Amino acid sequence: MSPTPPNAAGDLFAANLTGALLALASSAFIGVSFIVKKKGLRRAGAAGSRAGARPLCVAGDKRVGGYGYLLEPLWWVGMVTMLIGEIANFVAYMFAPAVLVTPLGALSIIVSAVLAHFTLNEKLQRMGVLGCVLCIVGSTVIILHAPEEETPSSVAQIWHLATQPAFLCYAASALAVSLILMLHCAPRYGQTNIVVYVGICSVIGSLTVMSIKAVGIAIKLTVEGVNQAGYFQTWLFVTVSATCIIIQLVYLNKALDTFNTAVVSPIYYAMFTSLTILASAIMFKDWSGQSVSSIISEICGFLTVLTGTVVLHSTRENDPTLSSDLYTPLPPIYWHIQGNGETAGKQKEDDLLPSDFITVVRQDYFV
């Protein structure tokens, strides 16, 4: 491979720096959105059924099943905040490779962890500070050793990359796993196993990033004067992006409403980032031309960030126990039967009974 001219190398470095700054801004907005949306979901849960609940089918019931959060203004504030972050992230992919942009999403975990400590009463212990530091150090290493990616010259070139046998196998496997999780696992284990909802978000998310990157490059080329709207592949990538984003949002809301933010955020980050780096390495060949030491440094940086997320979430408290939905089993109920003439004499004894005792007066004692 011929060496990159100095001017071109400077342009690639500037593009990476721009992408990194946009990714950092994106992480800040997305971290805030996690908290705002969580508060909106809690409000919606207090007024009706929750996002993780099964839709109700009772005639005349005015609740909207598992989608009551759509009527909560605070949830929409979180959505707008998340949209701003995603737009910044979208633009970042125009300038920098996914290997650089995606791992920087760990900083959103730091933001959400700190804000959750103050606003959601999800306590961040002292060891959590170590987790935050590890995330920052790992992100810095990734930025310093990120590959410099040349932008494809057309959407047709991106389509050629997307239709390589290796990436087609990855995409087919991702779709098969997603369908199994959505159709088989989610109805049975979604309320008890966090990997189900988060797994759907992560697998679909890796495809989202690839299609979003393709759309972003198409927009960038069009702005530069090379119109890409005439390629059918452009609109296919747009359709795939929109579909994947909707699926991600639905299952991310279910995960946030069912499980603690401290658990959802790091697991989602670890799974989503790992799969996205894998998908990008297969499709865009991000590591092609890099030295072994640079690749190892990036992997170590990612593992450092991953360690930080594990430390961060393992030192935080769980949410107060909330019932998942109307189908959650009730606690045991103890029956205390009293007959006629015993009520007054048993009053003192009843005061000592636990609150889940139900007193039943047998009417046959009164006849």
Image: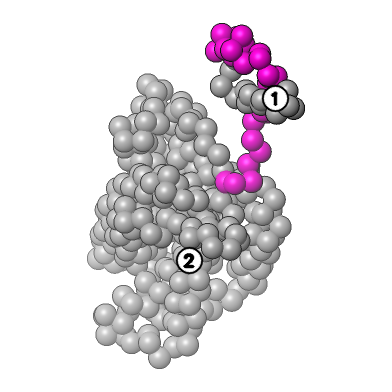
Q: Residue at x 64, y 30 (%)?
A: 331
Is residue 274 visible to the viewer in this orientation of the structure? no
Callout 1 touching callout 2 (CB < 8 Å)? no
Residue tagged 1: 366
Residue 134 against residue 205 in the figure, above or below:
above
Residue 93 numbered tag: none
In the image, what residue type sits under mark 2?
A: Ile
Q: Position of residue 329 (x, y in %)?
A: 66, 38
- Is residue 338 highlighted in magenta? yes
Q: Residues within 10 Å of mark 2 (few under 14, many from 20)?
A: few
Part of the protein shown in magenta? 325-352
In the image, what residue type sits under mark 1?
A: Phe
Residue 5 located left or right of residue 300: left
Location of residue 106 by image quarter: top left
Is residue 128 visible to the viewer in this orientation of the structure? yes
Q: Residue at x 52, y 41 (%)?
A: 259
Q: Position of residue 225 (x, y in %)?
A: 27, 85
Q: Position of residue 101 (x, y in %)?
A: 38, 55
The one nearer the camera, 49 or 37, is 49
Residue 313 located left or right of residue 216: right
Residue tagged 2: 246
